[in-house]
Amino acid sequence: MIKPNIPVRALLAFILTVLSGALFSQEKIDLVKYNKKNGAEVEVRDKIINISWPVRNNGKGRVKIDLQDGHPLFASLQLCKNGKCHTIAKDLDPAFVITIGKRDLISQNGWNIFFDKVPSKPFEAFNVQLEKSSAQVVSEGSRTKVIVSKVTASSFSGDLEITFYNGSPLINIAAVMSTGVDSTAIVYDAGLVGKNNAWKKIAWASVDDQLQNTSMNMMDTSNNLAVKYRTIIGENAEGSLALFPAPHQYFYPLDECFNLKFVWYGTDYRRMIKGYGIGIRQDLYGDHRFVPWFNAPPHTRQRLNFFCLLASNTKDALANVKQFTHNDTYAPLKGYKTMTSHYHIEHVTKMLEAQKKNIALPDTPSFVNVFKRTGINIVHLAEFHGVGHPTGPDDVRLRELKTLFDMCKRLSQNNFLLLPGEEPNNFFGGHWLDFFPKPVYWIMSRKAGAPFVTQDSTYGKVYRIGDKQDMLNLLKAENGLAWTAHARTKGSTGFPDAYKNEAFFTSPQFFGASWKALPADLSQPRLGKRALDLLDDMANWGLKKSIVGEADLFTIEPEHELYGHLNINYLQMDKMPAYNQSWQPILDVMSSGKFFVTTGEVLMPSFTINSKGSGDTATLNADGKATIKTSLSWTFPLNFIEVVSGDGKNVYREKFDQFETTTFGNKTFLLNLNLKGRKWARIEAWDIAANGVFSQIVWLKGN
């Protein structure tokens, strides 16, 4: 008889350990929704998930996810080519801090509020805790998602989602959580952290676009950095990892686009994240004006997320990140010019004050160079907002306008137009913008018996406006346009709904409204739902209106985080007028709906319904069948395309998931829908980072 050389109890313990690991693998790592044919390879061993997926240039990304308690979640992150793997980072955990405050839902307009000062009320920060109780691997087209349960922070709970994208070394890491508590506003910080020396150097682009780096020291306390491209990079001998947020979604609306040091690196961040890490962050106090944070309505799945990009070196890592936003510029598109609107730069006021004090200002203010470098052709201002003398005295008002017009003329050159505009906020109700096709002198007051228009020896025609009818008459006389600024929020709460039946609003001179990502809500797969809903409502009211993208920002300087807060209008025009010509072609394109609005990452060179473009009327066959054709280009993989239509009463949505798309693509899509009984339709497309594009309305009629 052969006696065993190990004790029976030890043998039983070993068997139980093996069995428990096998049970975890079989029961707690769910592979039911994993498709082996989607291009990614998944291997499960005990509590380890090994994922490899194809990246560019015939390479592979490889990540080892460790579900053992007490072990870092990311055992390793690698780039592989020709059978050789390089470890970019190892032994890291995702880290999230959620700061929870109180949303004011009473004093103004509920969840659409902007005039809220969340950090002036009690708030509290919490670490997001990860409990590795189970995991699931899900294939979605060309993407592979690992869902680890569960994550918790105060009243919030949910899952950690890690998504890999075929064709790219791009990874998205998200704590997807919800709360049952009402009136909640949040911000979050996030990153990757470890107890060991994950990187030798930390790198970033300075605000003047110079690559910087510093040697890593595990003893360094955390540092917050003002950077360009919102990116922080960890580097070691085998490669680099760039970490960055969604370029627009991460920035809740503010009056100022200050660079508030949106990345961090070092030890013990906020004295809450233990270990050494890199990450993204928010300044809790914003621009110290109105600071609304993000909405978090009850039971909505808020995506606290960031991106990682693996590269062979730091220079490539930064260059690859910059490609997602076209280097933070708006890419030229044949047959289109880019236009942005609604800026309270108030440079005219600065000029007049400098003249009084005999102070010389630079010939070209810095904001002009910023706009040009961002790829913007046309800037429509909104001057004298809270400053200036719109109601007079007459001589002061007219001198201010003359200074504005002269400034715009002097600074408009070389495929760049700086065009005058104001946010008058008189006569109609709420806040609105004006846009004339040439310089127009007008005063926002008219005494009883005073003429509507007079001839001035210095300024020519001068209009005096006393009420909404006068204002409409001025718009008609000078072929001007007006539209509601920040509709249904801020100073336009309740508008344009309150005047939707007024003669001025139903007239062709009232263009419609404007679009901006306001309010912010991380549960939404798109931006700016408030304004998109209004576009649909106006169409159902039977009014041919459009919405133009607006910035609604104040100071613009080279070091600011302009791109994150910006959107752009692509106007369908081959050539821009010179400043001393009529700008009517610009207004004509706008009023005819021949443009699209985008955050910049998704472009829409063409869109038709039954061969008719936005602003036109398409004829439906008797059976209501419609062929929708759109050409799109994108940087981040697309998330979905949606066709939105209405019948004068209801709004209908047809969603087309785009999970097969990869990074940096373009395609012409043909969608066949039945639109019988519909009176209008439009299209929008959104990517995985909630960047997007939307068209204006195509009107529909039966055959």
Image: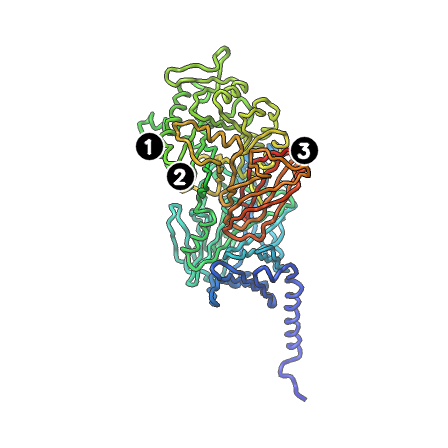
Residue at mark 3 to residue at mark 2: CA–CA distance: 43 Å
Residue 496 vertical position relative to residue 625 in the rendered view, above or below: above
Q: Position of residue 421 (x, y in %)?
A: 45, 28
Circle count: 3
Residue designated by label 2: 372
Q: Earlier in the sequence, mark 3 or mark 2?
A: 2
The image quadrant where one finds the C terminus is: top right
| Front tag of 3 and 2 | 3
Q: Earlier in the sequence, mark 3 or mark 1?
A: 1
Q: Is residue 185 visible?
A: no
- Tell me which corner region of the image, top left, top right, bottom left or bottom right, holds residue 11: bottom right
At label 1, the amino acid type is Leu
Characterize the local packing of mark 2: few (<14), some (14-19) or many (20 or more) Cα atoms within 10 angstroms.
Answer: some
Q: Earlier in the sequence, mark 2 or mark 1?
A: 1
Q: Residue at x 63, y 47 (%)?
A: 179
Residue designated by label 3: 649
| Front tag of 2 and 1 | 2
Q: Residue at x 38, y 38 (%)?
A: 369
Residue designated by label 1: 361
Q: Position of residue 352 (x, y in %)?
A: 36, 26
Q: Secondary structure at mark 1?
A: loop
